Image (spheres, rainbow, N blue to C red):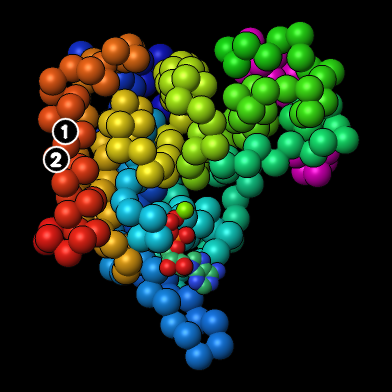
Amino acid sequence: MSLREKRSQETKRGVLVTQATRIKITDVSKIYETGTKKVEAVKNFSESVRDGEFVCIVGASGCGKTTLLWCLSGLHPATSGTVHIDGELLTKPLPDRIGMVFQDSNLLPWRTLIENIELPFQIKKKPVNRELIEELLEVAGLKGFENSYPGELSGGMKQRGSIVRALAQDPEVLLMDEPFGALDAFTREEMNLFLLKVWERTKKTIVFVTHSISEAIFLADRVWVMSPRPGRLSRIVDVDFARPRHIDLQFEPDFIEILKSIREEVEGSKIGKGK
Ligand SMILES: Nc1ncnc2c1ncn2[C@@H]1O[C@H](COP(=O)(O)OP(=O)(O)O)[C@@H](O)[C@H]1O
Ligand SMILES: [Mg+2]
């Protein structure tokens, strides 16, 4: 589908969500076996992500969020169940189609920012997409820092750099695991706004793991709430706030109401009160 066709499907929220399924997760379970110990990390997880959708996954620490994300990446296969990307069974990593961003920017300290961004092209032996990189650097506010080393950049800039590096590969899907978890609150807000700006421009399908419920609600079209380990999908929350979203949204009564209800679910289940 062309970008224009996608645009024509814009909803009144201004969100480019089409109905096509991008990721289909069917009955995924993951058991880690280390020596005699067995850890059931994810159990019978089924759900789909639509093309261009922004899904956030929240849940208590250790509930299996990271494990599920790795199953979606094709890097660590599920013990049972399947993941389909665009109808195709995922059996291996797809570095051209699935990008990943972690809490640590993982920029190589001995390479400049631009050398870090270009590295995946060199590894894949494909021509550098300079036009896209220029555009992404502009949105990321990193113009002028191309030749800086990671040690010369702030935490937020490094993380924006790692997002630019992932998006420069023009993947269809971006998987993000607590990418802003190590940043201070103000930087994190800036990063949330930056990410939404990039997403609204590029229309990638994003699955974003966070332990911050307010971050999840602020960013997402839908929030998936996971139960404590073994992680199951305990609830799906539709987030219908208009876009583009303003940072003050987090003080709106409707926002706080959703926040409280998800928090009760995550915390309640943690201390054995919940479902
Ligand atoms: N490689 C591994 N080997 C054994 N157990 C693991 C491994 N990775 C994660 N686990 C366990 O699986 C559970 C889920 O972990 P994880 O997916 O990292 O949770 P979350 O990201 O929600 O904090 C935890 O109990 C964790 O200790
Ligand atoms: Mg994790």
Would residue 79 appear left or right of 250 to someone viewing this image? Answer: right
Q: Residue furthest right?
A: 110
Instruction: Mark yes or no: residue 114 visible.
Output: no
Can you tell which quarter of the image residue 16 is in? top left
At label 2, which amino acid type do we have?
A: Ser
The residue under label 2 is 261
SS at mark 1? helix
Residue 128: x percent and y percent?
Answer: 78, 27
Question: In the figure, is residue 3 to the left or right of 225?
Answer: right
Residue 115 shows which numbered tag?
none
Question: Callout 2 environment at 10 Å: few (<14), some (14 to 19), or many (20+)?
Answer: few
Q: Residue at x 39, y 48 (%)?
A: 23
**Circle 1 residues within 10 Å: few <14, some 14–19, many ≥20:** some
At x 13%, y 20%, the residue is: 253
Residue 73 seen in render:
yes
Residue 246 location (% of width, % of height):
32, 12
Measure how far apart labels 2 and 1 are at the Cα level: 5 Å
The rendered magenta stretch, by its main secondary structure, is classed as helix
User: Where are the magenta residues, as a range?
Assistant: 119-138
- Look at mark 1 in the image and give the residue it sits on: 258
Amino acid marked by disc 1: Ile
Q: Is residue 135 magenta?
A: yes
Quarter placement of the C terminus: bottom left
Q: Residue at point 51% right, 57% down?
A: 70
User: Image quarter for residue 160?
Assistant: top right
Instruction: Kindly check if marks 2 and 1 are in contact, taking CB atoms under 8 A apart as contact.
Output: yes
Name the element at disc 2.
helix
User: Whole-percent x and y of residue 161?
Assistant: 66, 26
Q: Nearer the viewer, residue 11 or 6?
A: 11
